[in-house]
Image: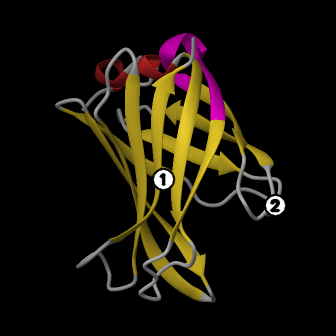
Amino acid sequence: MDQQAGLNAFAFQNGRWSVVHRKRRRRLVGETEWLTFRGSCNAWEILGGAGNVDDHWLEDPSGAYAAATIRRLEPDGNWSIWWIDPRFPGLASPMRGSFTDGVGTFHGEEVLAGRPVLVRFIWSNISAQAARWEQAFSADHGLTYETNWVMEFERAA
């Protein structure tokens, strides 16, 4: 894959969105309770389509907060993604991946409760008016994943 093929891959996200969030109360412990809350997102391309920024407001029941995502198209054609959340210091390692047939799949690593986990993001159901993002964690080296956060984007008026 070359960089040119991935250019403008996040153009669908440009503009203002209303977002419905669903998050598991706790992750990778067999939790079945989901929290549902609203949010908003404003996104735009940078670097001539080789980058993307989104700015979020999340009405999380545990406390509302702002967060952002920075995405960069790498020379190898894959995207690197960093989530910036003022509740946590610094930047975590980026998620990396690309879009195939209209679905974006990205992988990375995090630490949860002191243990390393694999992380997967999937962008799907993308149209001019809607998109879906989901995050899943794996504690068994990618054999199984547990979805723990879903964002349903709807174009704001």
Q: Which residue is mark 2?
A: 87
Q: Is residue 53 left or right of residue 109?
A: right
Residue 32: x %, y % from top left: 43, 78
- How many badges with numbers are in the image? 2
Q: Say which of 95 and 56 sits in front.
A: 56
Residue 22: x %, y % from top left: 50, 56
Magenta-drawn stretch contains 105: no
The kind of secondary structure element at disc 2 is: loop
Please rate how many residues cluster around mark 1, counting C-alpha atoms within 10 Å: few if below 14, some from 14 to 19, many from 20.
many
Q: Which residues are magenta?
A: 40-51
Residue 100: x %, y % from top left: 20, 35
Tell me: residue 121, above or below residue 118: above
Amino acid at dot 2: Arg
Q: Please give the name of the residue rendered at 63% of the width and 89% of the height, measured from the top-left corner.
A: 114
> Which corner quadrant of the image does residue 53 belong to?
top right
> Visible in this render: residue 9?
no
Amino acid at dot 1: Met
Q: Say which of 107 and 60 sits in front.
A: 60
The way the protein has been coloured in the rendering is secondary structure
On-image quarter of the N terminus? top left
Please rate how many residues cluster around mark 2, counting C-alpha atoms within 10 Å: few if below 14, some from 14 to 19, many from 20.
few
Q: Please give the name of the residue rendered at 47% of the width and 32% of the height, measured from the top-left corner.
A: 153
Q: Which residue is mark 1?
A: 95
Tell me: residue 53, above or below residue 64: above
